[in-house]
Image (cartoon, grey):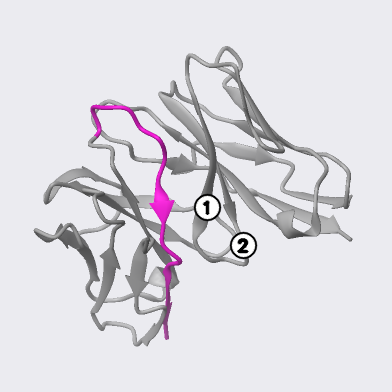
């Protein structure tokens, strides 16, 4: 079953603009991660935020986590055509296993 | 350094057949997980292995099985294939055992299985 729900399902922006994707989840989590997938191939790990963290940065990426609202957002600043991909949030509950539960993803198109 | 390698990259099978997918984790990674991704959906967890022991199993029928070898590589087997098994099968490796700190998974490029 899918735990997370990304919003929007699809997003189209111009190169140089910022892209914001949101993720909501249902149960308590240990970590939340964001992954990128190009053209239905393997996933690339972007960033991990722990349940006791509220914000994290990595290059042009900014992730926030609000455990009270069970939601997270991924901001990509100054987007590039190469950022065109599907983005997934994934949660794990710890408890002895780092089984990931993914949402359905946001398909981002960056127009040059 | 080699990443997570999966073989084959593409596979076409007939309904009722059996298939074996292979995965080699990043050197030093002892945890291997398998995920199924149907077109248009997010990946769904199938199995996790750590140190050759099953650490988790997702909501998949018994037709799905897996194992991990002493060199930490892994195989996923699917018996009695159904059309609905057509998907991208992803393998992921990690240093994490499930009790220590976790820094995310490294995924392979996947095996695209088509059942006809």
Q: Position of residue B20 (x, y in %)?
A: 24, 75
Q: Which mark is residue B10?
A: none
Query: Residue A44: which disc?
Result: 1
| Residue in view at x 26 percent, y 49 percent | B29
Seen at 51% across and 55% down, the residue is A43
As drawn, is A56 to the left or to the right of B105?
Answer: right
- Same chain check for tags 1 and 2: yes
Identified at 47% across, 19% down, the residue is: A51
Q: Position of residue A24 (x, y in %)?
A: 60, 30
Q: Quadrant of the C terminus of chain B?
A: bottom left
Question: Numbered disc 1: what chain?
Answer: A
Mark 2 Cα-neighbour bin, 10 Å: few <14, some 14–19, many ≥20 = some
Q: Secondary structure at mark 1?
A: strand
Give the image quarter of residue A21. top right
Q: Which residues are magenta?
A: B98-116
Name the foreground residue: A101 vs B111.
Answer: B111
Label 2: chain? A
According to the image, label 2 marks what residue?
A38
Q: Nearer the viewer, residue A41 or A46?
A: A46
Say whether marks 1 and 2 touch (CB < 8 Å).
Answer: yes
Who comes first in sequence, dot 1 or dot 2? 2
Q: Residue furthest front?
A: B1
- Tell me if mark 1 has few (under 14), some (14-19) or many (20+) residues whose alpha carbon lies within 10 angstroms of its own: some
SS majority, magenta: loop
In magenta stretch: residue B108: yes
Query: Tag 2's secondary structure?
Result: loop
Instruction: State how far apart marks 1 and 2 are (Cα).
Output: 9 Å
| Depicted B17 relative to depicted B56: above or below | below
Residue nearer the viewer, B77 or B31: B31
The answer to which quarter of the image holds residue A8 is top right
């Amino acid at each position: 079953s899918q735990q997370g729900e990304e919003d929007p399902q699809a997003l189209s922006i111009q190169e140089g603009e910022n892209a914001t994707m949101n993720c909501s989840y249902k149960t308590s989590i240990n970590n939340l991660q964001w992954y990128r997938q190009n053209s239905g191939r393997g996933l690339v790990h972007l960033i991990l935020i722990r349940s006791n963290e509220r914000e994290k940065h990595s290059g042009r990426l900014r992730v926030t986590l609000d455990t009270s609202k069970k939601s997270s957002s991924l901001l990509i600043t100054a987007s590039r055509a190469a950022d065109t991909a599907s983005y997934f949030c994934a949660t794990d509950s710890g408890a002895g296993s780092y089984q990931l539960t993914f949402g359905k993803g946001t398909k981002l198109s960056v127009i040059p | 350094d080699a990443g997570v390698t999966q073989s084959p990259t593409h596979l076409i099978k007939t309904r009722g057949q059996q298939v074996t997918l292979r995965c080699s984790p990043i050197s030093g990674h002892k945890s291997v997980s398998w995920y199924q991704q149907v077109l248009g959906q997010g990946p769904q967890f199938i199995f996790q292995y750590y140190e050759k022991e099953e650490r988790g199993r997702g909501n998949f029928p018994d037709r799905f099985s897996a194992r991990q070898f002493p060199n930490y590589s892994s195989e996923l087997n699917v018996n009695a294939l159904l059309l609905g098994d057509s998907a991208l099968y992803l393998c992921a490796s990690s240093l994490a055992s499930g009790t220590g700190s976790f820094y995310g998974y490294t995924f392979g490029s996947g095996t695209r299985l088509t059942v006809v």
